[in-house]
Amino acid sequence: ISAFEKYRHTAHISSCSKKGNGNMNIIRAEKKYIGQMAEIEKECFTDPWSEAAFESSVGSQAEIILAAEENGKIAGYIIGNCDGHQGYIENFAVSPQMRRKGIGDSLLEAFICALPDTAEEIALEVRESNAPAIAIYEKNGFESVGIRKNFYSDPKENGIVMIRRIERDQDEC
């Protein structure tokens, strides 16, 4: 059984439960959730992924796609992959109505647990102006390592490259 499967069967977002949000679980996202994920995407980003992009990711064996779910309702998701040594977060969002409840932290933790044991670090890009996202990444051990000029469009903006080293003895899965 993989580290993700072990995590999946036992993981509950404890900080959400403590705030009265019921029994939210981190699950492997399925096609039936694409519409909800696309709606969250539109709420969160000026240049959102299309439903077709979500469909392609959910259908790929190479992707790690996790969602925070409670009673069939998606509150957030994280999509990424791993080349063996480096994980990469392609897309990550939490519904604006569900923020500040620990969902983002739990999705990041579950993503780390879903990576193969060979993964040594995780990389991502984030808009320079996205202070809340930068804060959650820094809180979860990511560090800024560079800038990608004009990485984003609509509006055009630089992307901050962030990396987090994975310490298997310290990261509990």
Image (tube, grey):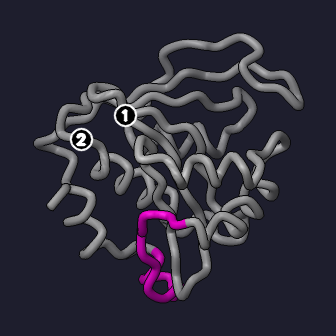
The furthest residue to the right = 155
Whether the residues at callouts 1 and 2 have beta carbons within 8 Å, the answer is yes
Tell me which amino acid carries mark 2: Pro
* Mark 1 neighbour class, 10 Å CA radius: few under 14, some 14 to 19, many 20 or more: many
In the rendering, which numbered label is found on residue 52? none
Quadrant assignment, res 121: top left
Q: Is the residue 143 above or below the residue 171 in the image?
A: above
Q: Which residues are magenta?
A: 16-30
| Residue plotted at (88% across, 29% down) | 155
Q: Is the residue 7 above or below the residue 16 in the image?
A: above
Residue at the disc numbered 1: 82
The N terminus: image quadrant: bottom left
x and y, in percent, of residue 158 in the image: 73, 19
Give the tally of numbered discs.
Answer: 2
| Residue plotted at (41% across, 61% down) | 106
x and y, in percent, of residue 84 in the image: 28, 29
In the rendering, which numbered label is found on residue 116? 2
| Residue plotted at (69% across, 69% down) | 36
x and y, in percent, of residue 56 in the image: 61, 47
Tell me which amino acid carries mark 1: Cys
The furthest residue to the left = 169
